[in-house]
Image (spheres, helix red, strand yellow):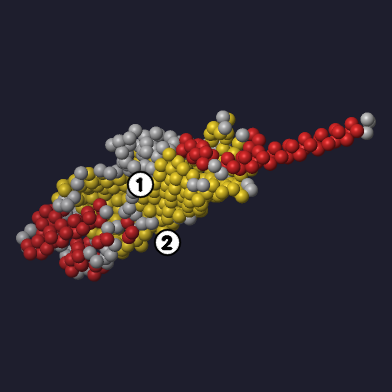
């Protein structure tokens, strides 16, 4: 009897182990079967829709290989006007840690997406949900009557394409997202930033932090050829944008209108603060840009006014103006342009200082215009009656410019006409026409 009892206990224990193993195998098989089912995909899609505040979301059928899960694509749409209108992700791969299942958690050590496309919200009268992407891991979803969490440890996107408006976006950037508590740390490499009316910029790198509802840009470095821009600031979802931009060696020609690209060349350096409300209503998109800029290696050529002045004053150097200085402070809104402390100089020929505003098609400006005595000698009476102040090697006068920007009125031309008297009436008419043409071309340049 003593020998039989241990045998019975041994076989019982072995039987229990076998039954436990069989139960585990069956449970794993049933669980795998459920993971491959449409019900699981539906539940997972519902959880993603809630996390994104989307109207609907859908995963393609998933394939499992040990701890790896593969999906061909994911699609989500949003119709409340907030955040995005659609998201499409292609070639998803997730590395699961199955130990998390013991704690009712789907732990994803790494999620990779080959391509992600995000389209902006469509303009509509729909009252928007102001929430953006759900932040913070872990997200929760119901499964089998229990509440489960999704714990995403890291996400990598090889190619992200995001259009923030029909006019602008970023394409082809690589993103790495790492959760930090309820926030995300985001790094970006590569890609092209485009905006209608501006040259394309290459994104070298960016370091950001998503702390709902605000995206903080710690640094973003962009280039265009040998031009460089550094951006810092914040974007508060569907509320406001506040960015600081430092730019160096920026080629001025890509930001000019086509007819001016052959006339002006140079490099701009300076800084600007860009602010804009991002919500709906009349204020949405009211971009305000304030800053200062200076131009180096500036050259004005192929201007008829320069040829005329060169001919009239017998000064060949006017045919090509090498700008030794060009700088200004500026503020631009959708309806108003203000230029302050503007200085434009071709040393030894001409210097212009002043400020002006352009609003509702009307210009109002006051300028100090300086010409060298050797230039003015060809305009009789100009130094005695008009350019009467000597300073810094120039003879100076004040010029007021007002009226419609297309046909401004200045007070310099009549004074030049009066100064010359009737001695050279034909020459005076030439001066008047030259001045008016020069003012029009100069205004055209300043407004663009």
On the question of residue 214 being in view, the answer is no
Q: Position of residue 367 (x, y in %)?
A: 23, 50
Front residue of 440/88: it is 88
Per the rendering, the mark at residue 165 is 1
Q: Which residue lies under the disc numbered 2?
A: 225
Q: Position of residue 217 (x, y in %)?
A: 47, 44
Q: Is mark 1 on a helix, strand or loop?
A: strand
Front residue of 44/108: it is 44
In the figure, is residue 178 to the left or right of 298?
Answer: right
In the figure, is residue 238 to the left or right of 394?
Answer: right
Q: Nearer the viewer, mark 2 or mark 1?
A: 1
- In the depicted structure, whether residue 126 falls above or below residue 92: above
If the image is split into quadrants, where does the N terminus sit?
A: top right
Q: Residues within 10 Å of mark 2 (few under 14, many from 20)?
A: few
Residue in view at x 73 percent, y 40 percent? 21
Residue 386 occupies which quadrant of the picture? bottom left
Q: Position of residue 433 (x, y in %)?
A: 13, 60
Residue in view at x 68 percent, y 41 percent? 25
Residue most extreme to the left: 422
Q: Position of residue 66 (x, y in %)?
A: 64, 48
């Amino acid at each position: 009897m003593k020998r039989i009892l241990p045998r019975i206990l041994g076989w019982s224990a072995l039987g229990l182990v076998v039954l436990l193993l069989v139960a585990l195998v069956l449970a794993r098989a049933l669980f795998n079967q459920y993971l491959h089912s449409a019900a699981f995909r539906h539940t997972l899609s519902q959880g993603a829709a809630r996390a994104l505040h989307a109207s609907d979301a859908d995963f393609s059928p998933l394939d499992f290989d040990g701890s790896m899960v593969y999906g061909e694509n994911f699609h989500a749409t949003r119709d409340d006007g907030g955040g995005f209108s659609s998201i499409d992700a292609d070639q998803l791969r997730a590395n699961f840690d199955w130990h998390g299942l013991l704690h009712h958690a789907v732990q994803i050590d790494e999620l990779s997406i080959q391509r992600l496309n995000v389209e902006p919200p469509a303009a509509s009268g729909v009252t928007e949900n102001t929430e953006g992407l759900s932040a913070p891991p872990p997200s929760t979803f119901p499964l089998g009557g229990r509440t489960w969490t999704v714990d995403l440890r890291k996400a990598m996107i090889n190619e992200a394409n995001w259009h923030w408006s029909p006019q602008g976006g970023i394409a082809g950037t690589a993103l790495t997202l790492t959760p930090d508590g309820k926030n995300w740390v985001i790094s970006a490499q590569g890609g092209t930033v485009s905006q209608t009316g501006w040259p394309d910029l290459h994104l070298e790198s960016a370091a950001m932090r998503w702390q709902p509802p605000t995206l903080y840009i710690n640094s973003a470095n962009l280039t265009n050829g040998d031009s460089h821009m550094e951006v810092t600031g914040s974007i508060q979802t569907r509320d406001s944008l506040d960015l600081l931009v430092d730019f160096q060696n920026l080629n001025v020609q890509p930001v000019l209108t086509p007819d001016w690209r052959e006339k002006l060349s140079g490099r701009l350096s300076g800084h600007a603060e860009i602010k804009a409300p991002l919500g709906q209503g009349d204020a949405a998109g009211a971009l305000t840009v304030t800053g200062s800029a200076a131009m180096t290696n500036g050259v004005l050529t192929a201007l008829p006014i320069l040829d005329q002045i060169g001919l009239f004053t017998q000064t060949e150097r006017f045919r090509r103006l090498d700008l030794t200085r060009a700088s200004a402070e500026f503020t631009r809104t959708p309806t108003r342009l203000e230029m302050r402390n503007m200085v434009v100089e071709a040393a030894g020929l001409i210097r212009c200082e002043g400020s002006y505003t352009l609003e509702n098609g009307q210009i109002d400006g006051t300028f100090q215009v300086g010409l060298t005595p050797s230039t003015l000698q060809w305009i009789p009476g100009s130094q005695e009656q008009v350019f009467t102040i000597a300073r810094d090697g120039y003879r100076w006068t004040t010029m007021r410019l007002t009226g419609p920007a297309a046909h401004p009125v200045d007070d310099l031309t009549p004074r030049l006409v009066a100064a010359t008297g009737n001695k050279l009436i034909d020459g005076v008419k030439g001066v008047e026409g030259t001045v008016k043409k020069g003012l029009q071309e100069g205004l055209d340049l300043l407004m663009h």
